[in-house]
Every structure is written in C-alpha cells, then in structure tokens.
Amino acid sequence: QATARPTLVRYLKREQRFLEKELQALQRQIEKHIDRDPTLKQKYERLQQMNGVGPVLAATLLAYVPELGSVPDATISALVGVAPYPKDSGKTRFPRHVRGGRAAVPHVLYMAAVSAPHSNPILTAFYQRLKAKGKPAKLCLIAVMRKMLTVLNRLLAPTPLVHVETWLAGTALPDLWGLAAGQCNDDRLARALDALYPHLDALWQDLIVAAL
C-alpha cells in the first residue's frame, strides 16, 4: 500500500493535466465558434454584462437555450428546469418542486448562483431577504437561479423601437393619469407598441372612419 500510493498519485496528476489541457482546447474552440458569428458574439458579451455570469454559463445558455430572449420568463424557467410546479391533491397543498428542463443547464446555472451573491449586490440582497424569511438554503439558491435567468432573458430581448417615456412625454396622458412619464417606461408595453407599429396606418384609417 505504501508503494502503491505514490504511483496512483503520479497517474492521477498526469490524468488531471491531460483533462485540463483538453478543457482549455475545448474552451478555445467554443470561443472561436462564437467569434465567427457576430450575433452569437453580441449575445455572449451581453450575457456577461451581468455580474456573476462568466464565459462558461454564457456559452452554455447560448448552446442549450437558443430561445433565451425570445420567449416569456416563465417559459424560460420551465425550459431550464427551475420553474416550481405544484403537487397538490384536492384541498391538500404540498410544497412546490422544480423538475424537468434541459439537464446540462441547471448544473452550470447552479454553480453560477452559488458564487453570484458574492459578486452581485442585488442578488446578495435577494438571497438574504429569502434567508431572513426562513427559507431553506437550497430553495434560496433555486430562486437566485430563476432570478438570474429572468434577468438574462430580458437582457437578450429585442430592444423596443418605441421608447415609452419619450413617447408619453409628448402627450397629455401623464397628466391625465397623474403619473410621471418615466414610471410608464416598461419594456413589455414598448414591445406591444412595436407589434402594433406595422399596422399604424390601418389603425389611423379605422379611427378616422369611426370619428366621421
């Protein structure tokens, strides 16, 4: 046994060096692939603007969750496997559990969520609020995972053509509503206006006809 241990350590270290080189080579191939595609590169850099998101998580999301930025937050959570599902029976209510999803993503997202509260003050405060309410540590981490995914989904969402704050400032609506224009600057509203924009002429015609 005394002679076997140094031999095993030598083999294991050699195996470790081999695997580290392979990982580095694979990372370089991934980076080259992303660099060749302007859209991927833009998304890759955009995702890493969030504190706590590094190259590994960004590349994993781009590879396994191409829907990121194009579907609702709840859908993304379900696709990744961090959406809570009820397990009730009649009037009996049981704790919700996450399940399903694309297996490769939650593992990477989990490791990012473990370290993110140390580098992201917003996630730190979010995690601490949940802990203060007596939530289990694992539940808090899953909530951080879901929060990160929500933010990243919105980061990749198309930038609205309509800036609601600017548009409202030129109307009488803020005075009628009793709200500052900046309080109405919501991306969802802007995207809804974007969807209506191609039909603007037809809508004006309908309004004119209705007013006559």
Image (tube, grey):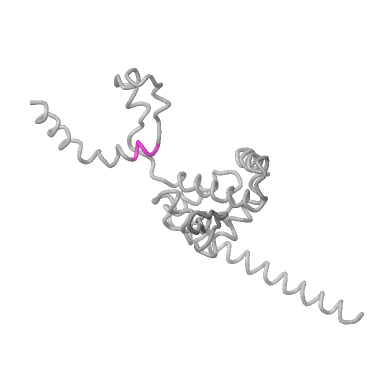
Quadrant housing the N terminus: bottom right
Does residue 110 lie above or below 127 as drawn? below
Q: Check the image and name the residue furthest to the right.
A: 2
Residue 102, position in %: x, y? Answer: 50, 63
The mark tally for this picture is 0
Q: Is residue 204 left or right of residue 44?
A: left
Asked whether the viewer can see residue 65, the reply is yes
Q: Residue at x 50, y 56 (%)?
A: 86
Query: Which residue is located at x 69 percent, y 72 percent?
Result: 18
Query: At x 77% / y 74%, what residue is drawn?
Result: 12
Please identify the quarter of the rendering in which residue 186 is found.
top left
| 123 relative to 63 in the view: left or right | right
- 31 and 195: which one is in front? 195
- Residue 195 coordinates in the image, percent (x, y): 28, 42
Q: Is residue 46 visible?
A: no
In magenta stretch: residue 188: yes
Q: Where is 167 relative to 26, above or below? A: above
Check the picture and name the quadrant holding the C terminus.
top left
155 w.r.t. 22: above or below:
above
Pick the residue in front: 34 or 141: 141
**Nearest the camera: 15 or 159?**
159
The residue range painted magenta reads 187-191
Where is residue 17 shown, x and y percent of the image? 72, 69
Q: Is residue 64 left or right of residue 123?
A: left
Magenta: main secondary structure: helix
Which one is nearer the viewer's eye here, 76 or 134? 134
Whether 1 is among the magenta residues is: no
Single out the residue that lies furthest toward the left.
212
* Residue at horizontal 32 percent and vertical 19 percent from the top: 176
Outermost residue, front direction?
91
